[in-house]
Image (tube, rainbow, N blue to C red):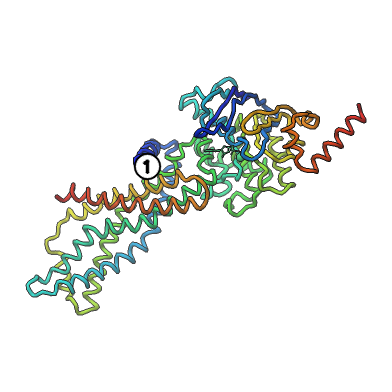
Amino acid sequence: MSALNKVGEYTLLMQKVLTRPDRFRETCKQIVREMNNLGVSSIIIVLIISFFIGAVITIQIRLRVDNPMLPKYTTGLVTRDILLLEFSSTIMCLLLAGKVGSNIASEIGTMRITEQIDALDIMGVNSANFLILPKIVGLVLFSPILVIFSMIIGIVGGYMVSIFTDLITTDNYLYGLQTFFVPFYIKYSIIKTLVYSFLIASIAGYYGYYVKGGSLEVGKASTDSVVMSSITILIADLVLTQLLLT
Amino acid sequence: MIELKSVSKTFDDKEVLKSISTSFLPGQTNLVIGQSGSGKTVLMKCIIGLMTPEKGEINYDGRNLLNMNRQETKMLRREIGMLFQNSALFDSLTVLENVMFPLNMFSNMRYKERAERALSCLDRVNLHDIGHLSPAEISGGMKKRVAIARAITLKPKYLFCDEPNSGLDPKTSIVIDQLIKEITQEYNITTIINTHDMNSVMENGDNIVFIHEGKLEWNGSKDKIITSSNKKLNDFIFASNLFKKVKNIEIGLMEDEG
Ligand SMILES: Nc1ncnc2c1ncn2[C@@H]1O[C@H](COP(=O)(O)OP(=O)(O)O)[C@@H](O)[C@H]1O
Ligand SMILES: [Mg+2]
């Protein structure tokens, strides 16, 4: 199927997804469930990765900018900006695309091949809306929490480097963190993450919803959804950065 | 009553259903039989509106499905129960939640009433004390029964079963057939069952529609099937030696009587 066809099919599906739910009470229950399934269960991995990346960035920057001409606050400042601008939003969402996206695509894909989606349709439930909307809303609502956690823990990672190594002093690191701080970067990161979360959940939902065949196809749909949402995230990053920062 | 008038369905350029006309009455066991790939599932999906035929009419007590707008289709769906080939229970819900699901979505009952209704439906299919289990924890036959319970929670006027016996042992198979038959009579439901289980055909076939390569080849009751001279039907029904013997014995008995 051509790329254009897919975009068309995706758009049509989103029209079905983004409508008023048949039953608010049931959809709310699902949203809570999805926030837990998709969001809460991702906290640990986000924390672990952010901590190590924060620490590694600090070490790398400190080693690369070992030049007496550069001010002492450089390391803290650069670490902070990398985390705030790109890592805690874009890179973290690429990670979520892998973890959450494959989960969504395989869950919905399995429901498709075992006729659970047909069963919903027969009952007169808008299956696309009932299954995909709670995942989108759940992930979008929860993702700002993940970004904030990632930023904080990343910075803590760098701080640990300043404590446990003599590459950089704690004072210099903390001073760097506060130098030329642009609060808008946090907002920018959160805006990006909201867009990415929507893309991850909706693209994975799309791939799962249209699975045809058996378990092999479910596996393929889940891989395809990860690839496609990663690419889309990177394109969105380019567009959003142009829109918001220039 | 469900009435089909020259229903045709084509995939790409493969004609899967060729102008099928027939009718299915309430309160009796309507069977659609035919080889694998003959078009039974496609026919059923057309009747319930999961697929749209290119031509024809599908009348639910006089209301043509193909002329309905979205709201009307939605209302019709509430009157339909369906039993899928592999039960299609929702994995993420418990057995009780599965049976309650249609009520949660479409009734205005309170929680307590919904739970009571769901439990009474589970009772009806002779399942007790398994409401808290998940579908993965129960046997295939139990899943089928839970699916029947789920299909009848909203008291449907029409019930569809796609190969309700597939994957079940002969004994469980009979239990499921019997259950569907009883429920159909009790609530005067228009029930359509796809099957290639010869036992169900011979036991329960009040009205049998035989489909061969997408064409309605033969239509009649189980009593007529034995004496039918339709070659394709005979090839299909009496493919196994056991049923060939049964046929010869039955015909012998008839000749003795006559
Ligand atoms: N979605 C589809 N697209 C194309 N061909 C299909 C589709 N569904 C079924 N068919 C074809 O229609 C024919 C009838 O299939 P089906 O109704 O499933 O047979 P059965 O009688 O075993 O239920 C088969 O040849 C099948 O390949
Ligand atoms: Mg079939």
| Rendered view: A174 above or below B159 | below
Residue at the image position 64 percent from the left and 45 percent from the top = B144
Quadrant of the image for the C terminus of chain B? top right
The percent coordinates of residue B130 (x first, y second) are 63, 50
The percent coordinates of residue B68 (x first, y second) are 49, 23
Tell me: A227 left or right of A107.
left
Residue at the image position 21 percent from the left and 62 percent from the top = A82
Tell me: B202 left or right of B214.
right
| Rendered view: A196 above or below A171 | above
Label 1 element class: loop
Of all residues shown, which one is farthest toward the top? B62
Which amino acid type is shown beneath numbered disc 1? Ser
Q: Which residue is mark 1?
A: A2
Q: Quadrant of ligand 2?
A: top right
- Residue nearest the viewer, comparing B2 with B92: B2
- Residue nearest the viewer, comparing B176 with B99: B176
The percent coordinates of residue A170 (x first, y second) are 18, 74
Of all residues shown, which one is farthest toward the bottom? A166
Of all residues shown, which one is farthest toward the right? B256
| Rendered view: B243 above or below A40 | above
Of all chains, the one bearing label 1 is: A
Quadrant of the image for the N terminus of chain B? top right
